[in-house]
Amino acid sequence: MVKDWINIQRPLFGAFLETHIQENNLRRIRNAIPIDWEFFGNYEHHNLGRIIVVWDPSVRVFICKASAQAVTCGIFLMAENINYTVTFVYGFNTVSERMVLWEELVDVHDSTPVLNSPWVALGDFNQIIRLSQHSGYPTALIDDSGIEDIVSVMQDAELFECQAKGSPFTWWNNSGSSPISKRIDHALINPSWVATFPYSFADFLEPKQSDHAPCLFRIPSISRHKRKPFKFYHDITDHPEYPSVVSEAWTSAVVEGSHQFKLVRRMKLLKPGLRELNKSHYSGISERVKHQSAIVERFQTSLFRCCKQLIKLLRNNKQPRLREQQKRKERKWELLY
């Protein structure tokens, strides 16, 4: 279900906030994300790995700081040449335990990377920010403990709620007799984020089978470049660098798992090298053939105007190159599947 959600929504990165994924059970995460995605879990700080960050290989993710309640990452979108800071939050259940989280957010705010960087802190804070974020408001008596703490840290860290769409509540207690809903999941941004991405917003979607609404943070100003599907052209096997490119990709990384997984993973690792080889030596082959044909035609015309012996010599030098490029062009479309 998670993999289908990722394929439909097409996020570039995100985080699972889960309390039941032990480190020796990480195959659940591997099976839930696309096969070439990377991931990081905060197991050094909590044995249940409460925060698992996942990302598409087109994104550079640098883990700046990790704890039991938060993971702060530097994000670099290579295609758009954009970088910013993201803190994924999963707050503990009690007010006293969350005090450590509030201190950490202030520390992140004071750190050098964030001082001049767009920053968003999002996730399950396990805390409402105001009474109206409880479904019992205004008729029921609502526990307001912790509100003063989170409001204070938002002021100290210069964070405020970003625009949001979807349900006003993000968590349900799944009780038929005494239903309660709260907004304890938040997306908080700093002034630099607003200046850089003024139209961004948090979209809280339908919870499906979870008791929490998943949050999809959208940045409309960032255009997504759809990558062309990979194609293997037969002509690339004639290039002298082809064997070394294949060998390097096949042996450069240690791949663990089933034989089928190893094969698929290594073939994916091979794609970047083959793309670069094709781009460097075979891109625009039709234009190259056209250009070389024009050169040969000019020499053929000159046969009737200039010294026939000299032109013939030059012509013999150019035609083999034309035939070679024509051959490449013909083989380019012989795809191997």
Image: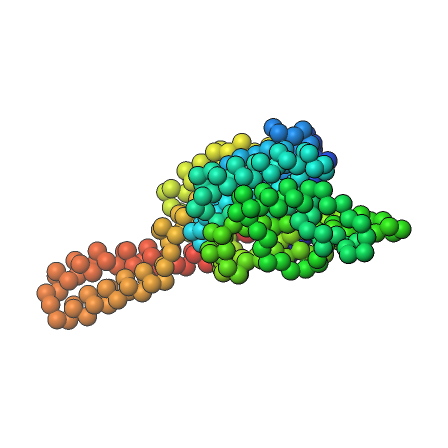
- Left or right position of 318 against 285: left
Q: Position of residue 272 (x, y in %)?
A: 46, 46
Instruction: Work out whether 144 lies above or below 334.
Output: above
Quarter of the image holding residue 330? bottom left
At 64% from the left edge and 41% from the top edge, which residue is drawn?
A: 149
Count the marks: how many?
0
- Give the image's coloring scheme: rainbow
Instruction: Work out whether 130 lies above or below 198.
Output: above
Which residue is farthest right?
177
- Left or right position of 197 against 4: left
Quarter of the image holding residue 300? bottom left
Between 262 and 300, the residue placed more toward the observer is 262
At 72% from the left edge and 36% from the top edge, which residue is drawn?
A: 94
Tell me if I can see residue 260 in this picture: no
Between 17 and 337, the residue placed more toward the observer is 17
At 61% from the left edge and 55% from the top edge, which residue is drawn?
A: 202
Q: Position of residue 46 (x, y in %)?
A: 65, 30
Q: Position of residue 250 (x, y in %)?
A: 50, 36
At 47% from the left edge and 43% from the top edge, which residue is drawn?
A: 114
Between 192 and 231, the residue placed more toward the observer is 192
Between 112 and 337, the residue placed more toward the observer is 112
Instruction: Work out whether 94 lies above or below 296.
Output: above
Tell me if I can see residue 159 in this picture: yes
Q: Position of residue 226 (x, y in %)?
A: 51, 58
